[in-house]
Amino acid sequence: MKKIFLSGLIAGTILLILSVAGLYLLLWLIPDMAMEYFGPAFTSRMQRNVFYYVHPFIIGMSLSWLWDRIQSRFGGPTLAKSLKFGLCYMAIATFPYMLLIYSAIDVSLPVVLTWLVFGFVEATIAAIIFNQQNIRR
């Protein structure tokens, strides 16, 4: 349990850094898409903004637990195992949720697709971290 918690905390920290960096990168590279975040579909209340910073830690802990349970299903080198885990997570969790969001919230398809890709990247990076944690033990 300690291994799952520590790996999840490390992954959450790295995912938070990447999430914030990705937001600034989006503002710089695709400012038109970034402007959608200021539309009426999104709420920006200070008491809710904390969830943006908590989310990577929840994902990190959840993925760490999942990785601990199913890592033996993925063979190959670290990158291959991590990509397989990322694809699995994207197919099972991220893709269906993005369909739901696209059908219910007034956001563009490119925004939803970036979220889909980000879900894949999150899970892949987390799996790389979890692999490294397993190697050290």
Image: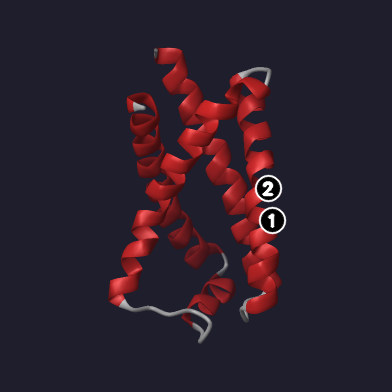
- Give the crowd class for mark 2: few <14, some 14-19, many >=20 residues within 10 Å: few
12 lies left or right of 121: left
Q: Which residue is mark 1?
A: 95
Q: Position of residue 40 (x, y in %)?
A: 51, 87
Q: Position of residue 9 (x, y in %)?
A: 34, 38
Q: Position of residue 133 (x, y in %)?
A: 42, 22
Give the residue furthest to the left: 47
Q: Are marks 1 and 2 in contact (CB under 8 Å)?
A: yes
Quadrant for the N terminus, please. top left
Q: Nearer the viewer, residue 120 or 34?
A: 120
Residue occupying the point 44% across, 53% down? 19
Quadrant for the C terminus, please. top left
As drawn, the label of residue 92 is 2
Q: Amino acid at mark 2?
A: Ile
Image position of 135 with respect to 27: above or below = above
Dot 2 falls on a residue whose secondary structure is helix
- Give the crowd class for mark 1: few <14, some 14-19, many >=20 residues within 10 Å: some
What is the spatial separation of the Cα atoms under label 1 and label 2, in whole angstroms? Answer: 7 Å
Number of residue marks: 2
Dot 1 falls on a residue whose secondary structure is helix
Please indicate, yes or no, whether residue 113 appears anywhere in the rendered image: no
Image position of 109 with respect to 86: above or below = below
Give the residue furthest to the bottom: 40
Q: Amino acid at mark 1?
A: Phe
Residue occupying the point 58% across, 50% down? 119
Image position of 18 with respect to 44: above or below = above
